[in-house]
Amino acid sequence: MFSIQNVSAGYNGVDVIHDINIDVRENENICILGPNGCGKSTLLKAMTGLIGYKGQILLDGVDIATMKRKEIAKNIAMMSQISSIYFSYSVYETVMLGRYNHMKKGFFKEPSQYDKEFVMHCMDIVGVSDIGEKQITELSGGQLQRVFLARTLAQDPRIILLDEPTNHLDLKHQTELMQYLQAWSKQDGHTVIGVMHDINLALQLSDRAVFMSDGKLISDGSMAQTVNGDLMQRVYGMDVVGYMQDSYQMWTEIASDKAKKPRIHRVV
């Protein structure tokens, strides 16, 4: 379906990632993990053709370097971290932007009834249909991130690339987003490839983990095969497993203390 073969890419003639090889199957969740600056986001940009690359990135056997932007966008959608907002659209208008590549005569064509219904469906999924008339400049970071997810879904892609998708989301919405993406990836040949810093969230979403360090692929396999203390130490330069165990112990103690507290019955 999607194959990254011997890919190197970077900026201003300097490669940031080197000789990356990843084969992606349908209905698969992949999380790309590694420290800041290791090339994760650069790899995602290469996967969408946003930056040039050496090697091949094949979608159904065709190198995306030979495909038109509109054709790539029909198959691959990228949801990046929130950045500056330069235009004030309503929530509904922002999500409708995701339908551009499916409109027969482009963005200035009146959306079809199907386009309108599909956009409302995407807004319902992420819980922003009740603020459809609001301007996006009025939204909180969490609301805005959900609007951008709805816009990504409105693109109706086969592959969604996520660059730190849970930034600005509270714990509840982080969990809901992961659950939805996990379910979405199991339908109709969909695939999710996400860059994350939160290893716990990655474990929730992914079937497979790709670890990177210094622009190179260090490990690629199922979560059970790849996530271990030695690898984490090598990639992150710290005892990640020990840190997680300490955190678990802390929460266990909090839960235990809560269970020991006597219940207070209010007298009416």
Image (cartoon, grey):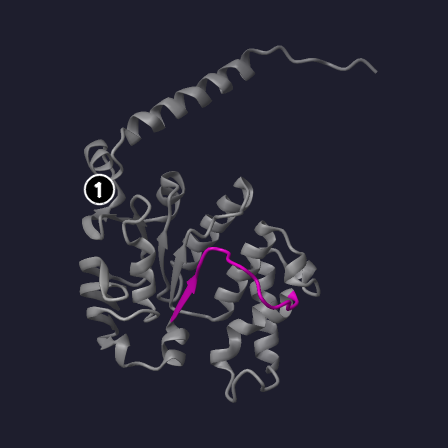
Q: Amino acid at mark 1?
A: Thr
Residue at the far right in the pictured view: 268
Query: Dividing the image into 4 quarters, which one contains the N terminus?
Result: bottom left
Where disc 1 sits, the SS reads helix
Q: Which residue is mark 1?
A: 226
Residue 194 lies in the magenta stretch: no
Residue at 20 percent of width and 71 percent of height: 56
* Residue 139 image position (x, y, % from top left): 65, 55
* Other residues around mark 1 within 10 Å, as few (<14) / some (14–19) / many (≥20): some
Query: Dividing the image into 4 quarters, which one contains the C terminus?
Result: top right
* Residue 175 image position (x, y, % from top left): 49, 44
Q: Is residue 210 above or below residue 266?
A: below
* Dominant secondary-structure state across the stretch colored magenta: loop
Residue at 65 percent of width and 60 percent of height: 137
Q: Which residues are magenta?
A: 76-90
Q: Is residue 39 left or right of residue 142?
A: left
Q: Is residue 199 left or right of residue 232?
A: right
